[in-house]
């Protein structure tokens, strides 16, 4: 076990407390700042372990990405197959042929850890669970989850189905970029089939959302092999924390150790804001583009994690844009980075992406620009 304070974000003379173990009963653990990705504490973070229902973090991520892309909507109906209805373990007792909207399926996954709802959503998005699992593994690879391999979408025991505390923190951080998900993960109790003769009462499997101030997710897990697991998140002020534990002996110990991780983070650290979402960062020029200049606006908050009491006087930032950016460029294409320094030391780097596609300008547009510049010079 070791403490990792990444990226020189704290003073060079910082003494790492190698004796600190916030999770003595966990098999592995990670404590991460959600905004910067900085790890404040870790224990066996790369060990490959069964994640049980924490698997559903990736399932929910793919659902939220499909919603954001317009592939599906919250109000789309999802029909339950016989296979989806046959799932054991935690479930919302879907019947073959039953239809439920995406919104309620997500509620069933996030709160009740519904294995049947997870498979129904997998089939809705990919046509089959097998194809959906391929999507899960592809997304894991894209996110740099190096110690993960999924075999199903719900976390039921299976050979070669594993992940790590570090990778769970990574996919949890990605899921939290879709803030709508916390409307499901933060609710302590709710109902499905409200208008039917038999409303189904949901109680969140994550009791911290009721008992810990600021906790609003994210996903619990349990199997006999995995033991008790949790990817928890809590937010206070502008600071959001992700705490992952795997292999805890029981729910009481699991919740107590995640609480201890949260308390440690909020007591010891703070986020120093660099930009708020919507702030103007600058602009970049596009050679031979349909438009010459593209404004850059922060699509998320940018901050650095610091120890409380540490001086912020040396914190400054700069935009480093790529030279010779030529059209065409795609929306989301990397065009530079935001570099944050403490004095001369780089403490954080954030990639910057084009917010819009820029097509190549036509011959006539380029000709008119040339003529215009000639007359302006004259």
Image (spheres, rainbow, N blue to C red):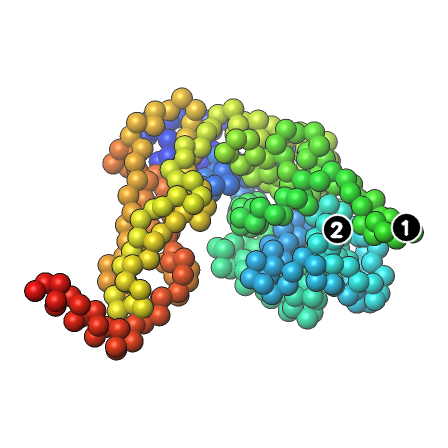
From the viewer's side, name the closer residue of 123 and 70.
70
Real-space Cα separation, disc 2 to disc 1, in angstroms:
16 Å
Q: Tell me the residue at 21%/69% (across/down).
A: 369
Q: Earlier in the sequence, mark 2 or mark 1?
A: 2
Residue 175 image offset from top left, x and y in percent: 57, 50
From the viewer's side, name the closer residue of 354 and 235.
354
Residue farthest left in this picture: 378
- Res. 76 image quadrant: bottom right
- Locate the C terminus by quadrant: bottom left
Q: Are marks 2 and 1 in contact (CB under 8 Å)?
A: no
Q: Answer left or right for 321 relative to 6.
A: left
**In what element is the residue under mark 2?**
helix
Q: Answer left or right for 314 relative to 223.
A: left
In the image, residue 130 sits, relative to residue 251, either above or below, namely below
Q: Tell me the residue at 34%/54% (across/down).
A: 295
Residue 284 image offset from top left, x and y in percent: 29, 56
Q: Residues within 10 Å of mark 2 (few under 14, many from 20)?
A: many
In the image, residue 169 sits, relative to residue 294, either above or below, namely above
Q: Tell me the residue at 60%/28% (across/down).
A: 260
Residue 312 image offset from top left, x and y in percent: 34, 28
Residue occupied by mark 1: 198
From the viewer's side, name the closer residue of 55 and 105.
105
Disc number for residue 108? 2
Residue 246 image offset from top left, x and y in percent: 63, 42
Q: Tell me the residue at 35%/36% (across/down).
A: 8
């Amino acid at each position: 076990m070791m403490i990792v304070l990444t990226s020189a974000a704290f003073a060079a003379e910082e003494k790492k407390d190698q004796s600190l173990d916030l999770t003595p009963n966990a098999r592995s653990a990670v404590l991460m700042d959600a905004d910067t990705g900085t790890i404040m504490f870790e224990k066996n973070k790369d060990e490959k372990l069964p994640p049980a229902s924490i698997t559903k973090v990736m399932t929910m991520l793919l659902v939220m990405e499909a919603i954001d892309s317009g592939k599906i909507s919250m109000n789309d109906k999802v029909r339950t197959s016989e296979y989806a209805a046959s799932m054991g373990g935690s479930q919302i007792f879907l019947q073959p042929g039953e239809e439920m909207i995406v919104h309620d399926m997500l509620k069933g996954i996030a709160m009740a850890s519904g294995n049947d709802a997870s498979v129904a959503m997998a089939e809705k998005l990919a046509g089959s669970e097998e194809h959906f699992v391929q999507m899960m593994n592809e997304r894991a690879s894209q996110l740099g989850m190096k110690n993960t391999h999924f075999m199903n979408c719900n976390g039921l025991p299976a050979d070669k189905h594993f992940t790590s505390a570090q990778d769970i923190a990574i996919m949890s951080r990605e899921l939290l970029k879709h803030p709508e998900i916390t409307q499901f993960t933060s609710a302590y109790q709710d109902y499905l089939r409200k208008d039917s003769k038999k409303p189904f009462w949901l109680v969140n499997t994550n009791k911290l959302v009721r008992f810990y101030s600021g906790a609003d997710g994210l996903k619990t897990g349990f199997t006999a092999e995995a033991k008790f697991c949790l990817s928890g998140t809590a937010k206070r002020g502008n600071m959001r924390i992700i705490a992952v534990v795997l292999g805890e002996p029981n729910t009481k110990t699991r919740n107590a150790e995640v609480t201890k991780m949260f308390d440690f983070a909020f007591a010891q650290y703070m986020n120093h804001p660099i930009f708020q979402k919507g702030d103007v960062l600058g602009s970049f020029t596009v050679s031979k583009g349909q438009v010459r200049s593209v404004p850059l606006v922060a699509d998320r908050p940018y901050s650095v994690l610091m120890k409380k009491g540490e001086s912020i006087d040396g914190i400054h930032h700069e935009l480093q844009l790529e030279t010779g950016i030529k059209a065409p460029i795609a929306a989301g294409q990397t065009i530079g980075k935001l570099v944050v320094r403490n004095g001369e030391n780089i403490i954080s780097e954030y990639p910057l992406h084009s917010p819009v596609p820029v097509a190549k300008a036509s011959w006539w547009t380029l000709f008119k620009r040339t003529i215009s510049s000639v007359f302006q010079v004259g």
